[in-house]
Amino acid sequence: DKWLLHSVLMLVQSWMEPLMYLQTTLNRYDDAPDALLNKTKWVSDKLLSLEQGVVVLIRKMLDEGILTSSSIFEHALNPYDEQSPEMLESVLRDYNLLICFKKDAHKMETFLKLLKCRQSNKLSCLSY
């Protein structure tokens, strides 16, 4: 269970900077729909909430408070703040970023479902 929570925390934290970068690049597109911009902000906010929740669970599980939550605003954009690539390159990079995020989000969901199942001691866990 500790490994599952730690894995989710690592995945969540690894996506904070890339999603902030994505928000920045989407704002540069002339015709980016507001719905896309709003959804990206929503996902970033939810990711931050998930991180905070996982940290609380880890603290409860370990019964100590040595882990700290990293704020989405504490991350610098330096690794992603390079020269602006051509528009097509930028769109392709952003698309690939979203594909990778979708895969990792699915992993996080699966880990959390398994953890919930283990904590509730249900036999239905065998289907996961």
Image: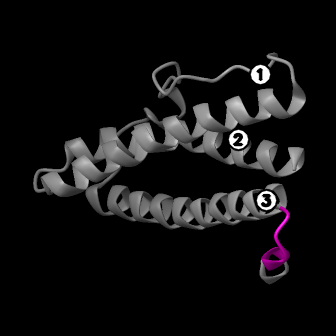
The relative height of residue 122 versus residue 36 in the rendered view (above or below) is below
Label 2 Cα crowd, 10 Å radius (few <14 / some 14-19 / many 20+): many
The residue positioned 46% from the left and 61% from the top of the image is 98
* Amino acid beneath label 3: Ser
Contact? badges 1 and 2 (CB < 8 Å): yes
Tell me, for residue 9, which label it has, or none: 2
Residue found at the very far bottom of the displayed protein: 127
User: Quick check: 124 left or right of 22?
Assistant: right
Q: Position of residue 89 (x, y in %)?
A: 37, 60
User: What stretch of residues is rendered in magenta?
Assistant: 121-125
User: Quick check: 11 left or right of 37?
Assistant: right
Q: Where is residue 45 in the image (x, y as percent from the top left)?
A: 41, 38
Residue bearing mark 1 = 67
The residue positioned 56% from the left and 41% from the top of the image is 50
Label 1 Cα crowd, 10 Å radius (few <14 / some 14-19 / many 20+): few
* Amino acid beneath label 2: Leu
The relative height of residue 118 versus residue 122 in the rendered view (above or below) is above
User: Rounded to the nearest whole Å, what is the CA distance between mark 1 and mark 2?
Assistant: 10 Å
